[in-house]
Amino acid sequence: MQSIFWYGLAAVAEIGGCFAFWAWLRLGKSPFWVAPGIISLIVFAVALSQVNAALAGRTFAAYGGVYIAASLGWLWAVEGARPDRWDVVGSSICLIGAAVILWGPRTA
């Protein structure tokens, strides 16, 4: 279950870091938004490397589903746009896929 914590932290840090660049480049915010964005992206990389999995590729693949769900949470919490039912259905499918990738039985 520690993996869930690290995936959650990674998602919030990545989305926050990317949003800092979005705010600067797309929303006309100050370039000073970049510094905390870079720090947030460093936190993302460190958090993702803490997931208890033997292979980086499998860790990153499973993270994709978490990222999608967290992005929809960001959409709602920060940008004020409520995800619709198709967002929720798609995100659920991705989270199920992430769980299969991360916790599926392995023969080797």
Image (cartoon, helix red, strand yellow):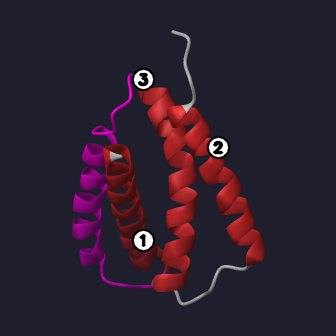
Q: Which residue occupies the foreground of this view, 47 or 96?
A: 96
Q: Is residue 65 above or below residue 79?
A: above
Please tell me whether the stretch drawn in magenta is mainly helix, strand or loop.
helix
Tag 3 or tag 1, which sits nearer the N-term? 1
Q: Position of residue 9 (x, y in %)?
A: 32, 58
Residue named by callout 2: 97
Secondary structure at numbered mark 1: helix
The numbered disc on residue 75 is none
* CB within 8 Å, label 1 to label 2: no
Taking the view exactly as shown, the residue that stands out farthest to the top is: 108
From which residue to which does the magenta span run? 27-54
- Specify the quadrant of the image occupied by residue 11: bottom left
Taking the view exactly as shown, the residue that stands out farthest to the right is: 86
Residue named by callout 1: 19
Residue named by callout 3: 55
Residue at figure coordinates x 29%, y 66% from the top left: 37
